[in-house]
Amino acid sequence: MSQPVIFDIAYTPYRLKKGSSQADIDKHAKDRAFFDMSGQDNNIYKYMTAEGKIMGEETQKFTMLEYLQKSTGVFNQNGLLSKQEVKEMKKRAQTGEKNIWHGFISFNKENSEKIDTPEKCIDLIKKTFNEFYKDAGFDKDNIDLMCALHLDKPDHLHIHYVFWERAPKIKNKRAAGYKYRAKGKISKDSILKMTERLNAYTINDELDKKRDEVIQSFSKSVAFEKAHFKDLAAKTLKELAKELPKDKPWFYASKEMAPFREKIDKAVDFLLSCDNNAYAAHKSFVKEMDKKEEALKGIMGKYYANQVKEEMQTADLFPNHTDFHGVGTIHTIEKLRWDYRRRLGNIVLKKAKYIQDNTYTYDKKFKRKTNDKFLKRNIAISNKKIKGYMQGLFSAVAKMFMPETNNYRNRLQEIEEEMIAKRKEEEQLISSPQPQQNEKYNRYKFGKGD
């Protein structure tokens, strides 16, 4: 059997070297117009989407026909390209001093069925080109790629492709700013790896399937979930430790913390997610607050709205009020919710502060020896200390957060009882008849002093 897949690649430079013959210059101009799609009558896009090429004589065999008739006929690793995307890509191909790479991927008769639908082609590109870019020294996020499947040879289906750099990203040593990659030639090693990768794609490897099943199963497991949230919690805490100011007070309610509160809340959620019991208690309490907030608004009306306004003003003026006077001074769900978030946020801030204080920092502008033993030693000690602290932190999540959840949950029930009692008291006053006062007595007693 012949080699399953052939990978061909070439490139067209922006300009030829000095001293090129006129014949070479003329040929280059023609090739450049073809590949950057500036040629009106003949260019790579027109060739890739030519009806005879993308349909072929025996297109009834392929499910791709109807799909391509309704599209531009070209795609990349993200899917089929729209007309607007093609228009923008053409514009980028024609601007800037960039090389343009192009070629084809050809499948033999036995394996052509592996790329006979748009989904199969896009999957192939997605699974192979990013690794190729990496091997060849490209930035995968800075590449425009355009591909098309040609069906004119049913026994040898093949994909034509063309790509270029979207923007200059290489620092220019001779002048200010950035430039495009000057080197156009792709190393033989990168091409060989891509060829192996494409050929491996055609092999129906049961071991790969089993491996994917194990990975998928593990990704859904409790162990994976916990490990995932531990990573997120650690990452967020370290980011906070790095970003938070060193010369400002670290209190959740302080104005200086306002820009960081969203990230602090995320850190709380990630940490709680590391412990099933703590997370369940937290989510249950938040749900209960939402439910009772709506109920109390309906029961108390304007009275409750006024109470909320007063309490939230107090929260702005004296954010740490409940640290000294206790949660018993809270009488609305909104204030309770704010204070609960504040308390949990302060727990996280203490942990982030410890990380900041124990992270070894140094002036990177100061020149040091390549193997500075003192620097390496201090960094290693700092990393080990923080790693140990994080492990202890994850094992104590329930101990940190559960008392706060229980404390605030109890107060939530008390607030509900107080509000219901207050409502009953008001209803009783409205329904009870008021004793009529003696008008003469009132005039006699208060008349002269009025």
Image (cartoon, rainbow, N blue to C red):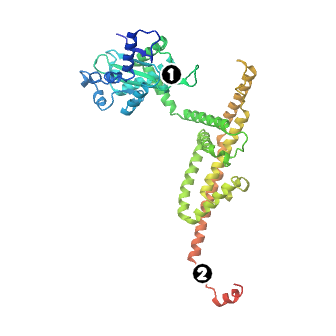
Which residue is rendered at x = 68% and y = 53% of the image?
A: 319
What is the residue that sits farthest to the right in this orientation? 374
- Rendered location of residue 117, percent (x, y): 33, 26
Q: What amino acid is labelled 2 in the image?
A: Gln
Report x, y in % for residue 297: 55, 61
Q: Nearer the viewer, residue 329 or 152?
A: 152
Q: The C terminus is located in which quarter?
A: bottom right
- Above or below, 192 relative to 297: above
136 or 437: nearer the eye?
A: 136
Is residue 405 in view? Answer: no
Horizontal relation, residue 23 to residue 425: left or right: left
Q: CA distance from mark 1 to mark 2?
A: 89 Å
Kind of element beneath mark 1: loop
Is 178 situated above or below 348? above
Task: Give above or below for 155 relative to 331.
Answer: above
Tag 2 residue: 434
Rendering quarter of residue 86:
top left
Q: Is residue 257 visible?
A: yes
**Is tag 1's residue or tag 2's residue first in the polypeptide sequence?**
1
Q: Nearer the viewer, residue 292 or 84?
A: 84
Left or right placement of residue 289 versus residue 361 in this view: left
* Tag 1 near tag 2, CB within 8 Å: no
Instruction: Name the residue beneath numbered marker 1.
Output: 180
Q: Is residue 151 left or right of residue 303?
A: left
Q: Position of residue 102 (x, y in %)?
A: 40, 18
Label 2 crowd (10 A; few <14 / some 14-19 / many >=20)? few
Mark 1 burial class by Cα count in 10 Å: few <14, some 14-19, many 20+: some
